[in-house]
Amino acid sequence: MPILAAMAISPRKIFLFLVFAGAIGLLLAFHKPSRKKLMQAPKLVFDSRNAGELKPPEGFDPAADTIPVVISTDEGRLMGAVAAINSIATNSKSPVKFYLITDKDTKDHLEQWILKTRLHSINHEIIVFNEEWVKGKINVRGGRQELASPLNYARFYLPKLLPPDFNGKILYLDDDVIVQGDITQLYNTKIDETLVMAFSEDCNTVSNRFGLFMNTYANYINFGNENVKKLGMKPGTCSFNTGVFVANMTEWKNQKITTKLEFWTALNTEENVYGAQQGGGGSQPPMMIVFYNQYSKIDPMWHIRHLGWTAGTRYSKQFIMEAKLLHWNGRFKPWGRTSQHMDAWERYYIPDPTGKSQLTRKFRMF
């Protein structure tokens, strides 16, 4: 049997083979991750109960990772504020903490609108604005008298409204906005060193593209006023809108911004500093004065505004869909009887569970 003899394997070779195979098996056992460990790996999970927010992974640091957003509103505009909150929570890829500023008469209504709807799980804090802070400091000359609402000036007092130890960046949004993009992108807007704010200019590529009216400082400020003349500002300087901004609260405190804003509001009650011009008064002119040529710029697509100026529009439907943030600044609000691109707002409308606030038109379900 020569063939069988040739195929014979010695006992020593079999022993060595078994030892080698056993060693390989032990190595694989030590280096192969267990199923249990794989299942415990932290990951972001979409949770529909949180209105579009992402549940944070293990090890999440709220102080470092949560995006703080401030919105101020009153009873007459509460419907808009809730839609704005819903749009942010739905589209944000980062956890958000909402600081909601309102008056004492609106606080409970706002809380019920949140707790009894899909927004019940959002991270939020409702803060009552102290109207004594602006008592005797508001003078709106003609134009839109709703700009005289004390809550319109809440943005001046962020250091007093936020926790005392709050530092770093904050987002402030008017209650007549809808956020269609990931708010993380807006929050990550770079603010140059030593500057406090980032705004979107009125004279940008979007305004040029659609032939929109470009506001300048002359549309808001009385350049005949002696105190204004001393500042050396140029009337033709492009203005910016204060309904959306990113702020460095550390620099805000260091540069005493609230005190500077209060100076100009108080002076305007004694002298004609602003308010009688085409752009109107309110909280915008004092911020334009304090931050003249001293701010960083927001990407124009993160503040598409003038949607409330007229019931008609120059924006195409496709452009509106591409915009990251829509702002219905002006008289024609999207919760009113008529406004442009109302469908973009209605996507985030949440009916009032208490029944106190009702749309004045038929609501189209999406």
Image (cartoon, rainbow, N blue to C red):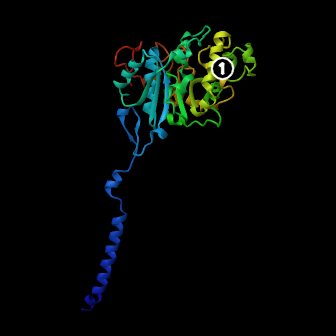
Q: Is residue 9 visible?
A: no
- Splitting the image into 4 quarters, where does residue 136 fall? top right
The amino acid type found where label 1 is placed reads Asn
Indicate the position of residue 114 as horizontal and vertical percent values.
38, 24
Horizontally, is 208 left or right of 14 in the view? right
Task: Classify 205 as above or below 2.
Answer: above
- Splitting the image into 4 quarters, where does residue 304 fall? top right
Indicate the position of residue 307 as horizontal and vertical percent values.
54, 20
**Dot 1, crowdedness within 10 Å: few (<14), some or many (≥20)?**
some
Closer to the camera in the image, 98 or 93: 98
Closer to the camera in the image, 187 or 286: 286
Question: Which residue: 59% across, 30% down?
Answer: 253
Horizontally, is 364 left or right of 270 in the view? left
- Secondary structure at badge 1 equals loop
Q: Is residue 25 visible?
A: yes
Indicate the position of residue 109 as horizontal and vertical percent values.
39, 18
The residue that mark 1 highlights is 215
